[in-house]
Image (spheres, rainbow, N blue to C red):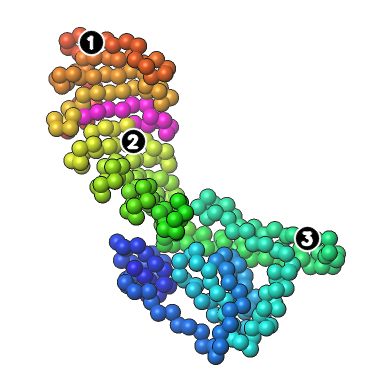
Amino acid sequence: MFCPKCGDEYREGFNVCATCNVALVKERPYQAESEFLKPVTVYETANVATIAFVKSIMESEGIEYYCKGEGAQQSLPVQIQVDEKDAEKAREILNQMESSNFELIESDVKNGYTKKIENKVTGKHTSKGLIKGIIMGIFISVVVFFVYDYQQKHLSGPVEYDLNKDSKPDYFCYYKNGYVVREEQDRNFDRKIDLWYFLKDGSLDHGESDDDFDGTVDTWYYFKDGQLTRCEADTNSDNKPEIISHFTNGIRDEVVWYHETSRVLWKKVLLVNGIRQEEYVDQDYDGAFDMKIVYNSAERPISIIQLPKSGVPKTQGERGKER
């Protein structure tokens, strides 16, 4: 699916462009070619900061240009084209830019690093050229910073990543006004999404996953202040959780099991620093735990205790969870 206005591509399931707020179409919209009598490519790059800088140079020199491929997938290179009559002048200006040995380093947007400029000065430069180069470097750094900052604050729509380097995207970040609002991942690389995370104000809010890769969500995650507090797992595809894990400060400290048909709470495990310490079991599903298992620091059972016939009553909260 494609946006008829900006040309951004979306996966199946999306109907409206997150940037332009217009309905998507199935075919990539026609992008008007340049009106030059004979367009000539003078520069090619996929670095968005470099593209912006080259555009500013062309505009400052009064050279009309056309960006072929702009608006397509972000990883694809964009060709800067000019009319044949301006090609020599454009190449000369761009060669001067590159001969100053300034290198644009594009950072990883996902990890939040900023772009920077490195000045590679050799012993062949004169002091005058060095000062000029430093001034040029400062100017380029400021331009790149503001371009990057503007893009981050206004970025909306999907950004794709290829984690296993098979030339097929398998991780997707969806931005709105510079913030990630949703993440999706194809963990087994079968071209189907099986993990979703939803963010609010830049922090994880909840998530869900298809852990057996059968096309149905079976696990749900809940976060508070960006930390995992609860995880629910459906083991028999009835859309009801049979195993619920509770977390404190991101560390699991309790896991409870519900019977897959009667929904009776029949087992509870207590953990300390993520290590199993005690396990309670309701063997006859009568509403009370009648067996206790104690574990050592290596999670090896060291004692099994049969509790009194009345058992250990479940708390009101635990009873309320039975469904």
Q: In the rendered image, which quarter is residue 246 located in? A: top left
How packed is label 1: few (under 14 Cα within 10 Å), some, or many (20 or more)?
Answer: some
Q: Earlier in the sequence, mark 1 or mark 3?
A: 3
Q: Position of residue 162 (x, y in %)?
A: 45, 55
On-image quarter of the C terminus: top left
Dot 3 crowding, Cα within 10 Å, few <14, some 14–19, many 20+: some
What separation in Å lies between label 1 and label 3 (alpha carbons)? 78 Å
Observer-nearest of 267 and 99: 99
Q: Answer with the quarter of the image where residue 10 lies.
A: bottom left
Identified at 26% across, 49% down, the residue is 215
- SS majority, magenta: strand
Task: Please determine whether, in this image, residue 251 is positioned above or below residue 205.
Answer: above
> As shown in the figure, which amino acid type bears the numbered disc 1?
Leu
Identify the residue shown where x is 42% and y is 17%: 297
Q: Amino acid at mark 2?
A: Arg
Q: Label 2 near label 3: C-beta < 8 Å?
A: no
Residue bounds of the magenta highlight: 246-258
Query: Which residue is outermost to the bottom?
Result: 37
Residue depicted at x 83% and y 65%: 125
**Residue for badge 2:** 230
Q: Is residue 78 left or right of residue 130?
A: left
User: Is 125 displayed left or right of 6 in the figure?
Assistant: right
Q: Which residue is mark 3?
A: 121
Q: Is residue 79 left or right of residue 127?
A: left
From the top left corner, tell me how far across and down residue 301 is, in percent: 34, 15
> What residue is shown with label 1?
307
Q: CA distance from mark 2 to mark 1?
A: 29 Å
At label 3, the amino acid type is Val
**Sequence-earlier tag: 2 or 1:** 2
Measured as percent of width and height from the top left, residue 124 is found at 83, 64
